[in-house]
Amino acid sequence: MSACTLIDKADVTPEMLAKLKFSFDDIYSSAENIEAASLAVKDANKKDFAMIPFCHTVEAKALGGDIFPGDDTAGPRTRSYIYKNMDELKIFSFNDFKDLQNLAQACKNLKARGEIVAWMITGPISIISSLLPIEQIFKTWRKEPDKIIKAFNELKDALLDSVKLICESGCDLISYADPAGNLDILGPRNAAFISQHFTSPFLKEAIEICKQYNTILSVCPLTAEALQKSNLFDDEHREERLERDEHDGIVCSCVKLIPNFNSRAKARPLI
């Protein structure tokens, strides 16, 4: 499977913002702006559901990352690294971050309008590589893997807290992806490591939270590929459940590509 072709896709365009009368800097500044941008993206992409946020940098920004908000050429991206190496990395809860609070309120506002809402969350390699050079991640991974595991555990707890907040906001579907951490970038050995020490335990805990709120948990096909090659999600009843249209587990689909919300019912169950 090739690398993600949607990683640099800007969901919010300059043309949309011109009509909405606010800038890239202002997208996450209020729940009202997020709501308006989400509806504009929904209309432009001819989908029947609204999607938030509009990038994979929200969590990194919540950890203090220096994120450029976007421009005519591309969407949000790292402007400069705030850490030089893994030893400097600090991980804490995202939930008090203003942008995340605004996103949660926007989700509630969209639900109050009768919208179906999908919320994208981001995995550890994409988050950490927005805070420090990715070569430093691999250097520590090679020499001191325990430090990577510690960071993964701290990020897992922070993301699980966010999953609960997202579910409480009324979100219909949470989509998990780690664009900078797919199999092609990491290689088989590192992909198996992250599947074992982060992705598998995170998803197994996240689905239990989602079930409490009747929220669907969807996983990027590239992440699912790494999990399945690691044999961490072995479900002999997967096809059986697919035929019965039962999706009480985790499904595998790309939320940016599905044409409408109900098509997620055709996504293959992961567990």
Image (tube, helix red, strand yellow):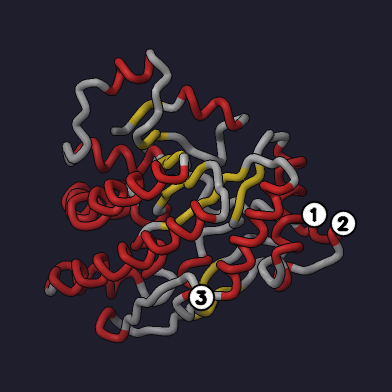
Residue 236 lies in quadrant = top left
Q: Nearer the viewer, residue 148 or 182?
A: 148
Question: How many C-alpha atoms fall within 10 Å of the one at disc 2: few (<14), some, or many (≥20)?
Answer: few
Mark 2 or 3, which is nearer the eye?
A: 3
- Marks 1 and 2 in Cβ contact (< 8 Å): yes
Label at residue 134:
none
Q: Residue at x 38, y 57 (%)?
A: 123
Determine which residue is flagged by label 2.
19
Question: How many C-alpha atoms fall within 10 Å of the one at disc 3: few (<14), some, or many (≥20)?
Answer: few
CA distance separating discs 1 and 3: 29 Å
Instruction: Point out the image quarter for the N terminus.
Output: top left
The number of callouts visible is 3
CA distance separating discs 2 and 3: 30 Å
Instruction: Point out the image quarter for the C terminus.
Output: top left
Vertical side of 186 occupied by 95: above or below: below
Determine which residue is flagged by label 1.
16
Amino acid beneath label 3 = Asp
Question: Where does the image place residue 222, in percent across and percent down from the top left?
Answer: 37, 41
Element type at mark 3:
loop
Determine which residue is flagged by label 3.
96
Q: Nearer the viewer, residue 179 or 111?
A: 111
Vertical side of 46 occupied by 123: above or below: below
Question: Where does the image place residue 192, in percent across and percent down from the top left?
Answer: 18, 49
